[in-house]
Amino acid sequence: MFAVSQKQWTYIYDNRGIEIHCLKIFDQTLQMECLPYHFLFVAANSRGYLSYLDTSIGSKVSAIRTNMGRLNVMCQNPSNAIIHLGHSNGTVTLRSLNA
């Protein structure tokens, strides 16, 4: 499976390109990461929200407002699942679902 962020919502497709899910809880998504060991899907959007989706039950776990504007850069540390966010003012913040 793979996820694609389109103009408004995020869609999940299977390996043949058939749409499986439309995630309307992830709107205006700019960056996405999958945390496979934690069964989490993380998305950052243009309004400054970092959202977590639990893929095992299919529900939104958390939405964190960063208060730093648009989130254009995001990556994860695979060893500890910390999300690194780059902001337009030059700051880098580290986010975890636990903190």
Image (cartoon, rainbow, N blue to C red):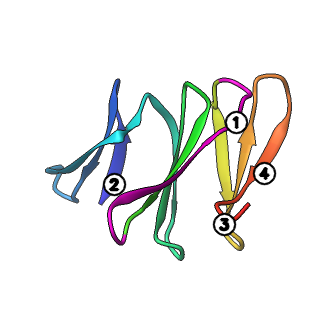
Q: Secondary structure at mark 2?
A: strand
44 vs 24, left or right, is right
The residue that label 4 is drawn on is 94
Cα separation, mark 2 vs mark 1, equals 26 Å
The stretch in magenta equals: 56-69
Q: Residue at x 75, y 36 (%)?
A: 86
Badge nearest the viewer, 4 or 2: 4
Coordinates of residue 91 in the picture (x, y in percent)? 85, 34
* Sooner in the amino-acid sequence: mark 2 or mark 1: 2
Q: Residues within 10 Å of mark 2 (few under 14, many from 20)?
A: few
Cα separation, mark 4 vs mark 2, equals 25 Å
Q: Secondary structure at mark 4?
A: strand
Badge nearest the viewer, 2 or 3: 3
Q: Amino acid at mark 3?
A: Ala
Identify the disc placed on residue 80: none
Q: Are marks 1 and 3 in contact (CB under 8 Å)?
A: no
Q: Amino acid at mark 2?
A: Phe
Q: Are marks 4 and 1 in contact (CB under 8 Å)?
A: no
The residue that label 3 is drawn on is 81
Coordinates of residue 71 in the picture (x, y in percent)? 64, 31
* Sooner in the amino-acid sequence: mark 4 or mark 2: 2
Closer-to-camera residue (99/55) = 99
